[in-house]
Amino acid sequence: MDLRTLEIFTKLAENESFSQTAEELHLTQPTISFQIHSLEKYYGVKLFQRTTRELFLTAEGKILNEYAKKIINLNRQVQEAMNEVNGLKRGELTLGASTIPGEYILLARLKSFQRKFPQIKISLKIADTEEIIEEVLEKKLDLGVVGSKIKHRDLVYEQFAKDKIVLIAQGKTKVKNFNLEDLKKQPILLREKGSGTRKTMLEALAKENIYLEDLNIIMELGSTEAIKSAVETGLGISFISRWAIEEEIKLKRLKILKIHNFFIKRHFYLLSNRKHSPPKIVQAFQNFLTHKNH
């Protein structure tokens, strides 16, 4: 039994899915099954109850999960203490980001950071804004980058990058200009609940007395890439981050539709938990992103 096996176990306990855990940890499902079987053999108990559709912890599994998380956390604290002595030579940084900053902004900056600190292992989780905020609150993530705010006394937001949310249509569309009333008649593709882009867009429209029920929503999609693909095929129009469509605009696969006297601007925020005392690595990365001492 080693630390890596415990990490696999806790991740499986969190996900309750072999396939999802395998994807997140970049392992095969048989490898995960072998590690769990080894743990069960080591402790002489059954850790998971399996049915055809569900996977959940047994009573013994719940006990081990609590201790395993403490062991993993303690190991990380030891590593962080060593990092303080060694001056950022080694360590681990766990980040979360909503779709736009995660897929279109952060990667280049992460590459630059790793050039400067090559021995630091960086883990980046991309999910919707609500999930990232929740995991920062639960201290599962050191930092988050999100496109909208949820008020909470423990959350600290710092402006990170600017963004515009624009209305897009298929590249062949002849219409160039819209007014807000025209929106009500058009087939609209919308991001899923929890999306920062969706939240910001609906808040901006609400200020103009246009609400979700006024719109002709024909489909909700779970990713920015899915939205782009659907708009390209002519299924409808959609609001999307300007960061996400640079290539498609150049290739004329998508077109931005201007709405008379209506603009949606927002910031992306670097998110931290004021109750989570950041190790030196996290502080260094935070400064790197916000160009402090950099």
Image (cartoon, helix red, strand yellow):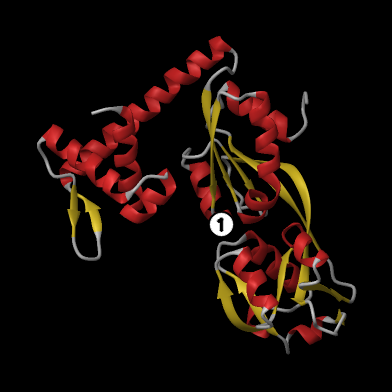
Q: In the displayed structure, does residue 75 sit left or right of residue 102?
A: left
Q: Quadrant of residue 85?
A: top right
Q: Quadrant of residue 145?
A: top right
Q: Which residue is mark 1?
A: 128
Element on which disc 1 rests: loop
Q: In the displayed structure, does residue 56 sit left or right of residue 261?
A: left
Question: x, y (%) of residue 30?
Answer: 27, 48
Tell how many labels. 1
- From where the camera sits, is residue 119 visible? yes
| Residue in the picture at 29% in, 45% down | 32
34 up-or-down from 223: above or below: above
276 up-or-down from 53: above or below: above
- From where the camera sits, is residue 207 visible? no
The quadrant in which the N terminus is found is top left
Question: x, y (%) of residue 211?
Answer: 68, 78
Question: x, y (%) of residue 157?
Answer: 67, 42
